[in-house]
Amino acid sequence: MNRYVIKALLVAAIVSLIAGCEEEPSEIGLNVQPGDNELEIKSTDTLTIHAHSTRLDSIRTDESEFTLIGSYYDTDFGISRSDFYTSFAMTEATYDFGNNPVVDSLVLSLAYKKHYGDTVTPQNLEVYELSERIEDTSYYSNQTFNHESVELSDNFSFIPKPKDSVMVDTALRAPHIRINLDGSLADKLVNATDSDMEDNESFKEFFKGLYVKANPVNEPGSGSISYIGMNSPLSKLTLYYHNDSDTSSYEYQIFANTPRTDYYTHNNYEEASASFRQQVINGDTTLGNQRVFLQAMAGIQTTIRLPHLQELKGKIAINNAFLQFPVENQSIFGPPDKLNLLLRTIEGGVELLPDNSEGDAYFGGFYNEADNHYQFRISRYLQRAIQGSEKSKTLLLTIPNSMNKANHAVLKGPKASGRKMKLKILYTKVE
């Protein structure tokens, strides 16, 4: 074993010169080694890879960094949409609407933070008052809450403008969506009693919050998801009113600990492409040889198997091993900026690969726009696998933090034409 380690260290000095080589590099550097210590350096990118995509069940979405709202229609993935449920909190410990308050308007505003998709397709939102309280607990992307039947926003339609400032009361504000709500809710709020507004617990029982629903778009290759910063001062419900002596407003805010959650739906992928449905819905794993899929919003993950690692058995030092995933060209729906690669344990759980502990710069996973691919360095994992200390040969490819993202990607499979999914290995045979 000591001799193995020493020889592995000797080759490290020349790895940087040949790490990208696709050809047999067995002669490089041999002239500087003594005859009886020659290192047999090899490379390969032909090891078998099996890949296929499957659906995710749900992910946790309560109080996430961004709230997602909107709908898009991708030619492969079909129609996806995100709705949300949120409660509100009083912003002042005391309130006084004055004598004979009369409602002027009630406005729900939602602050843009990011955007995914186009900015030309209208989005239609419906807003309902909740009849079921959102508790301060964990919620997942497939959970729903009861709501009243009266639609409060008159099927509000807007074209997303995530970079355009908005004029409010003669002043420009940061980009946000403004939805005027029906007067019935406004009247309820302005007529709240002292006991209704005694504290936030009483208020949340009196007014349980809102359900904001995105209607699905119906044109393939169109639509978008807006990322809303719910903790922004601009994300709030504002009651505008006047009384016998004044004109004023009262704000109901959303704070970091205000209960809320997203609801994602993909319509069971009814509108997805035939090849997508055959692989993901009907379970034809062989189709993963050509292309695989990834999707955030509790969508799609991809399983990667390396069944023939025994072909590398023996006294082998893995100098570098890169798992590469070329991306199919996409239109307005760009790929995620980063992917995550996990180890599927023998027991069925997941854990980090040993290479992950070296940091992102070493491990990789970032989208390389110039090469249109993702790449992970898995040298440490592969070394353990061929030595037998790591039993699992199954990896899981996902979109990290997918509760805060709407992206998706189509990747080329291990038997695709042209560029394909591959494992590139540079190794040294040590006898």
Image (cartoon, rainbow, N blue to C red):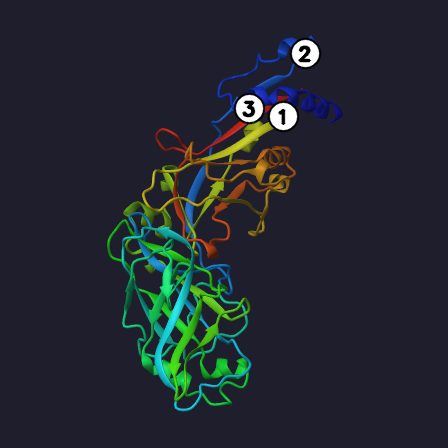
Q: Which residue is mark 1?
A: 316
Give me the C-alpha separation between circle 1 and circle 3: 16 Å
- Foreground label between 1 and 3: 3
Give me the C-alpha separation between circle 3 and circle 2: 19 Å
Q: Residue at x 48, y 41 (%)?
A: 304
Give the position of the C terminus as an image quadrant: top right
Q: Residues within 10 Å of mark 2 (few under 14, many from 20)?
A: few
Is the residue 244 above or below the residue 237 in the image?
A: below
Is the residue 164 above or below the residue 336 in the image?
A: below
Q: Which residue is mark 2?
A: 33
- Say what secondary structure mark 1 lies in: strand
Give the position of the N terminus as an image quadrant: top right
Q: Residues within 10 Å of mark 3 (few under 14, many from 20)?
A: some
Q: Which residue is mark 3?
A: 19
Asked whether the residues under the numbered discs 1 and 2 touch, taking CB atoms below 8 Å apart as contact, a structural biologist would say no
Residue sitting nearer the eye, 67 or 21: 67
Q: Residue at x 39, y 30 (%)?
A: 419
Q: Residue at x 53, y 80 (%)?
A: 200
Residue 421 appears left or right of 344: left
Asked whether the residues under the numbered discs 3 and 2 touch, taking CB atoms below 8 Å apart as contact, a structural biologist would say no
Q: Position of residue 39 (x, y in %)?
A: 64, 16
